Image: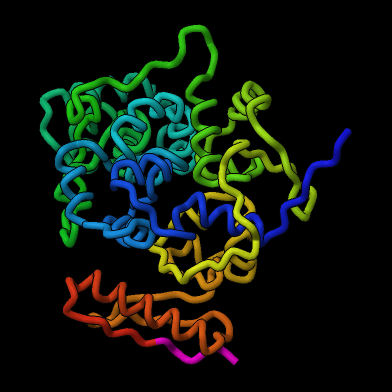
Amino acid sequence: MTAMAVLDTRALNRATLARQLLLDRADVGVQDAVAHLCGLQAQEPQEPFVGLWSRLRAFDPMELSDLLVRRGVVRTHLMRRTVHLLTADDVLAWRARHGAMLRQRVLGVYRDELAGVDLDELAAAGRAVMADGRPRSMAELARAVADRWPEPGPRALGEMLVAALLPMVQLPPRGLWRTKAGVRNVLLASWVGREIDPPAPDGSDPVGAALVRRYLAAFGPAATADLRAWCGLAGLPAAVAAIRGELVAFRDERGRELLDLPDAPRPDPGTPAPVRFLPAFDNAVLGYHDRSRIIDDAHRGLSVAGARVVLVDGRVAATWSVEAGTVAVTPLHRFSRADRAAVAEQGRELAAFLSDGESRRVEVAASPS
């Protein structure tokens, strides 16, 4: 038996950057980019704009806003029960496959409150309320069914309905460029004019297989544990097994098996990587169980705490924020003079993007000793 080739951390890093459109900015449209990336995590509504600015050449934020208004992309709970910005086509294709996971994740938070509640009955009641097509907040929907289920409380009822039982979308103006707006929900089918795709009638899992292929195209090479960490689904080993003959296998330096699409880019580990500013909760960091390819274990907590990070030589090397129009960068380790100059230049470009060219101010703090 031929031994599997070993991909070291730097090789995995460059593959990740290439798949995530972070090695070279891509000349693709916004909708195609969102599809390629399998969506962008978006519980913070403005963060996807920075994520796409860092990935696309000549990105126009109004194109994303227009896609939201025209219903080509939507904001919804999906992977890991978090709010994602996805193409409407992907949500329609993937939502049924995520349904059981979404229920279990909400139950994991509200199991005691929802004990004794028939979730199918709750779903039917919620759907009846939403059938008039009127957008509602989570609290409004919960109050509309609370007379029938008074014990759980509105938070438990609302989250189960909005995040798990009913395929919903968050309507614009939430998520539009430079717009602050509360969450107003409507049924996905009424918004896009089509019901979600049903599960395969023969018990096969074509959606699971598609998710494996799409994940590897955007995140590979990766282990099955990474795939599960990204989507939150427990049942994908069977889908992996079904398409294993299409895939190639490697090992990482720890001996884990990594799967990949045979023709997907795996750049030379020596390929230079430009400075990139990433938004909070970017899936380039969060899309793995083992995130060591892009972030040091000592800084892993930053990725789940909502810190915005800067990649230097492909790895998380700083955090950033915006204060009074100035992009403020805080290094996590010592920068070389060249690194500091590159971070400052990219920070000026980001400041200009965020301010329509009115500011190019950036401050890079002293490196830690």
Q: Is residue 275 above or below residue 18?
A: below
Look at the image and tell me in which quarter the C terminus lies. Answer: bottom right
Question: Is 368 one of the magenta-colored residues?
Answer: yes
Dominant SS in magenta: loop
Residue sitting at 49 percent across and 60 percent down?
23
Outermost top residue: 202
Q: Residue at x 65, y 61 (%)?
A: 269
Name the one closer to the observer, 182 or 31. Answer: 31
**Can residue 153 be spotted in the picture?**
no
Q: How is the image coloured?
A: rainbow
Give 164 or 122, whichever is nearer the viewer.
Answer: 164
How many callouts does the rendering have? 0
Please identify the quarter of the rendering in which residue 343 is found.
bottom left
Tell which of 30 and 227 is nearer to you: 30
Quadrant of the drawing holding the N terminus: top right
206 in magenta: no
**Coordinates of residue 325 in the picture (x, y in percent):** 23, 80
Question: Residue drawn at (31%, 44%), measured in percent from left and top?
Answer: 155
Magenta residues span: 364-369
**Is the residue 303 above or below the residue 119 in the image?**
below
Q: Residue furthest right?
A: 1
On the image, the x and y values in percent for residue 273 come to 53, 67
Determine if residue 272 is in view. Answer: yes
Q: Is 267 situated above or below 351?
A: above
Q: Is residue 262 left or right of residue 217?
A: right
Q: Position of residue 339 (x, y in %)?
A: 51, 82
Q: Is residue 61 left or right of residue 43?
A: left
Residue drawn at x 48%, y 92% as measured from the top left: 366
In the rendered view, tell whether residue 158 sits above or below residue 189: below
The answer to which quarter of the image holds residue 35 is top left
Where in the figure is residue 261, as x and y percent of width and height?
60, 36
